[in-house]
Image: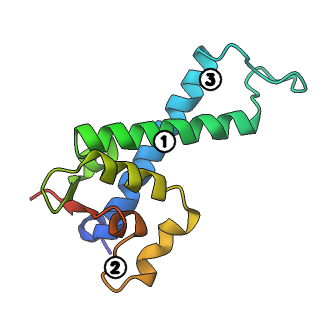
Amino acid sequence: MSYKNYLNNHFFRRGFALYIDFVLIAITTLLYLFLCDKKGPTVECDNFLCWNYNRIFCFEILFYCIYFLLMEFFFSFTIGKLILGLYVSNTKKKAIFWGILIRTMLRLIPLNLISFIFNKERKFWHETLSKTFTLRKS
């Protein structure tokens, strides 16, 4: 199967867009912790780049929520979606703030990644419950 066939698959496109967004969030988190965090590495660690994993996780969740909420509300896409030609919408053609907020919070549920399996319409929980959906730009 060629890479063009993979890119035509909607779930593959969305998954790859999410991967791009996760990489950007991880880079942002590490840059923030490296450049701006006053607390720095933990005391019990002798490595210069060693931070408490709980702090990294908390900052990643925070940046994750801020990134998806702001990007999808103001621009209707994230950087990963932009690169792969996807955008977020609802039935009114413009995603509303509360729908995007619900969408972002529901993504934090671990089973959301496979929730399309349990739905006849093959939609994720974060789309079904927030009444938003991801479309491909034509």
> What residue is drawn where x is 41% and y is 47%?
20
Please tell me which residue lies in front, 16 or 64.
64
Mark closest to the chain's N terminus, 1 or 3: 3
Q: Residue furthest left?
A: 138
CA distance separating discs 1 and 3:
15 Å
Please tell me which residue lies in front, 35 or 107.
107
Above or below: residue 119 compared with residue 51: below
> What residue is drawn where x is 64% and y is 38%?
58
Label 3 neighbour load within 10 Å: few <14, some 14-19, many 20+: some
Instruction: Report whether 3 appears left or right of 49.
Output: left
Could you tell me which secondary element the residue under label 3 belongs to? Answer: helix
Horizontal and vertical percent position of residue 103:
38, 56
Horizontal and vertical percent position of residue 4:
24, 66
- Amino acid type at circle 3 is Leu
Mark closest to the chain's N terminus, 1 or 2: 1
CA distance separating discs 1 and 2:
24 Å
Residue that badge 3 annotates: 33
Could you tell me which secondary element the residue under label 2 belongs to? Answer: loop
Residue 46's image quarter?
Answer: top right
Label 2 neighbour load within 10 Å: few <14, some 14-19, many 20+: few
Above or below: residue 28 compared with residue 87: above
Disc number at residue 64?
1
